[in-house]
């Protein structure tokens, strides 16, 4: 399984570019080695929690829709099999049994998901893994180099660039990709809702007309043409299909509403875009580092450890933001990511005070 975010630091070490070879001795530090091992285990546990949660929820929601589909088919069978009543009756019983089995499966999976902690457990596992992953880089930044003769400014510059290459840029690419994906899914969700609303509107109109004609027949005010419509085979077919389509549409609504409540792509896209903007403000893009990062580079070259730690703390704060909200038992998406431009100004001011 691959991490939700970037490669664990342990894998980064194995693929350490030649330009960072002078950092290699630091990775043998005992505390850092232990944290790398713990972070990889936490990352695996978080991935497993995400996989299990998504499996339970997706199958449960699919079972809800399947239950509605079986119910819709059971409504159609008597009309379609009017010439073979015994066969139609058997198939209707089979479809009804499948309907309740699907519904039972959905209820069981939802109950299992609640027992396992649901989405909150997944997010807490992901938050713990993220915190450990950032701890690796924090320890790397603070760990001394075994060579006392190495220039402090050179070492800090090397560490800062490694943080950018191994953490900031992969995260920037990750959030860019995920925000685009969430935006596409958000558009798909809107189109799906529109189609469902149109289908429900059509079914409602048929049901309204049919219901009106039936009510008029009870009051003996039904016109002759209306009586003819009620007695026609076409009306019976339309009534059956309308009932079946309405049941299927309700199942689709239950499925789409369930997914929207758990995977709100519109909120996710907004949050990811805000985080991406903050990352770009802090470190720039791959080809253009940006003013804040260049300022941190200048401070690193002067041996200013505090300024580099300020830059890293700002990066860690951006990456931990969503997970910190979950650890505080707050709903993801209820709080925005903040103004990226404002964050950039605050970080720039903090770094400037060290000059």
Image (cartoon, rainbow, N blue to C red):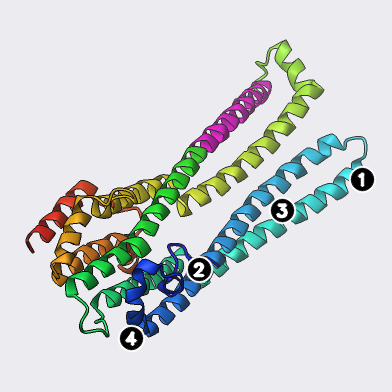
Q: Which residue is labeled 1 in the image?
A: 86
Q: Quadrant of residue 125?
A: bottom left
Residue 50 sits above or below residue 61 on the image: below
Horizontal side of 168 relative to 311 (left or right) equals right
Horizontal side of 8 relative to 57 (left or right) equals left
Circle 3 sits in a helix, a strand or a loop, which is it? helix
In the rendered image, residue 38, in percent from the top left (x then y), is placed at: 42, 81
Q: Which of marks 2 and 4 is nearer the N terminus?
A: 4
Residue 254 sits above or below residue 331 on the image: above
Q: Which residue is labeled 2 in the image?
A: 47
Q: Is residue 148 magenta-colored? A: no
Q: Nearer the viewer, mark 1 or mark 2?
A: 2
Q: For the N terminus, give its image quadrant.
A: bottom right
Looking at the image, can residue 330 be seen?
A: no
Circle 4 sits in a helix, a strand or a loop, which is it? helix
Horizontal side of 83 relative to 217 (left or right) equals right
Q: Which residue is labeled 4 in the image?
A: 31
Q: Decide which of 260, 174 is in the foreground and name it.
A: 174
Q: For the C terminus, give its image quadrant.
A: bottom left
Q: Which of marks 2 and 3 is nearer the N terminus?
A: 2
Label number found at residue 99: 3
Q: Which of marks 1 and 3 is nearer the N terminus?
A: 1
Q: Which segment did they paint magenta?
A: 190-218
Q: Nearer the viewer, mark 1 or mark 4?
A: 4
Tell me if mark 4 has few (under 14), some (14-19) or many (20+) residues whose alpha carbon lies within 10 angstroms of its own. few
Q: Nearer the viewer, mark 1 or mark 3?
A: 3
In the rendered image, residue 56, in percent from the top left (x then y), is placed at: 58, 63
Name the residue located 62 percent from the left edge and 30 percent from the top edge: 203
Q: Earlier in the sequence, mark 4 or mark 3?
A: 4
Circle 2 sits in a helix, a strand or a loop, which is it? helix
Q: Which of marks 2 and 3 is in front?
A: 2
């Amino acid at each position: 399984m691959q991490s939700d975010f970037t490669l664990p630091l342990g894998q980064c070490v194995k693929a350490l570019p030649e330009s960072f070879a002078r950092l290699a001795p630091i990775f043998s530090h005992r505390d850092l080695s232990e944290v790398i091992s713990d972070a990889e285990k936490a990352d695996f546990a978080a991935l497993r929690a995400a996989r299990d949660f998504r499996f339970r929820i997706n199958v449960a929601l699919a079972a809800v829709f399947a239950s509605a589909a079986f119910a819709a088919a059971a409504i159609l069978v008597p009309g379609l099999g009017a010439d073979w009543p015994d066969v139609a009756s058997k198939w209707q019983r089979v479809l009804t049994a499948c309907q309740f089995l699907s519904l039972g499966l959905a209820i069981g999976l939802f109950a299992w998901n609640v027992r396992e902690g649901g989405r909150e457990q997944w997010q807490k596992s992901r938050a713990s893994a993220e915190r450990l992953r950032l701890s690796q880089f924090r320890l790397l930044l603070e760990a001394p180099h075994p060579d006392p003769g190495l220039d402090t400014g050179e070492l800090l510059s090397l560490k800062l660039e490694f943080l950018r290459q191994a953490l900031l840029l992969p995260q920037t690419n990750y959030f860019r990709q995920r925000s685009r994906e969430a935006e596409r899914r958000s558009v798909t969700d809107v189109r799906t809702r529109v189609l469902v609303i149109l289908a429900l509107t059509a079914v409602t109109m048929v049901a309204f007309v049919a219901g009106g004609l039936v009510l008029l027949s009870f009051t003996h005010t039904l016109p002759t043409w209306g009586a003819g419509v009620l007695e026609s085979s076409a009306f019976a077919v339309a009534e059956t299909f309308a009932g079946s389509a309405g049941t299927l549409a309700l199942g689709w609504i239950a499925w789409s509403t369930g997914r929207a409540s758990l995977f709100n792509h519109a909120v996710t896209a907004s949050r990811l875009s805000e985080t991406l903007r903050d990352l770009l403000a802090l470190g720039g893009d791959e080809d253009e580092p940006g003013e804040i990062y260049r300022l941190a580079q200048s401070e690193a070259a002067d041996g200013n450890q505090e300024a580099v730690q300020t830059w890293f703390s700002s990066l860690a704060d951006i990456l931990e933001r969503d997970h910190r909200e979950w650890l505080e038992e707050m709903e993801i998406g209820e709080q925005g990511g903040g103004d990226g431009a404002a964050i950039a100004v605050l970080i720039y001011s903090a770094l400037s005070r060290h000059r």
